[in-house]
Image: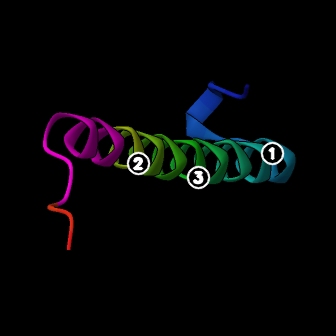
Amino acid sequence: MGFVADVATQLEVTTAQTNLTQLKTNLLFSILDYNQALAILQRSINPPASP
């Protein structure tokens, strides 16, 4: 990565942006997985009442 005078190549900037986008996507999927697991846990602890 270019550190001289805070200069980075276009490839480095694009790579960093791509990595950031991938990390944000991973975070969103992790939050989704957590919420799904939490919902399953809550249903197993307190199942809905039978009609």
Specify start and end residues of the magenta stretch as a single range: 38-48
Q: Amino acid at mark 3?
A: Thr
Disc 2 packing (10 Å; few <14; some 14–19; many ≥20) = few
Q: Closer to the N terminus: mark 2 or mark 3?
A: 3
Callout 3: few (<14), some (14-19), or many (20+) C-alpha neighbours within 10 Å? few
Looking at the rendered image, the quarter that the C terminus falls into is bottom left
State whether the magenta stretch is mostly helix, strand or loop: helix
**Callout 1: SS:** loop
Marks 3 and 1 sit apart, C-alpha to C-alpha, by 24 Å
Q: Which residue is mark 1?
A: 9
Residue type at numbered disc 1: Thr
Q: Are marks 2 and 1 in contact (CB under 8 Å)?
A: no
Q: Quadrant of the N terminus?
A: top right
Crowdedness of circle 1 by 10 Å Cα count: few (<14), some, many (20+)?
Answer: few
Q: Which amino acid does the dot numbered 2 rest on? A: Gln
The residue tagged 2 is 36
> Quadrant location of residue 42?
top left
Residue tagged 3 = 25
Residue at figure coordinates x 17%, y 34% from the top left: 45
Q: Residue furthest bottom?
A: 51
In primary-sequence order, the first of circles 3 and 1 is 1
Quarter of the figure with residue 12? top right
Left or right: 32 with respect to 3? Answer: left
Q: Nearer the viewer, mark 3 or mark 1?
A: 3
Foreground pick, 23 / 36: 36
Q: Measured from the top left, where is residue 13 in percent x and y?
A: 71, 49
x, y percent for residue 39: 30, 48
Query: In percent of the image, x 41 and y 48: which residue is there?
Result: 36
Give x and y (percent) for residue 48: 19, 59
Q: Residue at x 58, y 42 (%)?
A: 26
- Left/right placement of residue 9 relative to residue 43 reads right
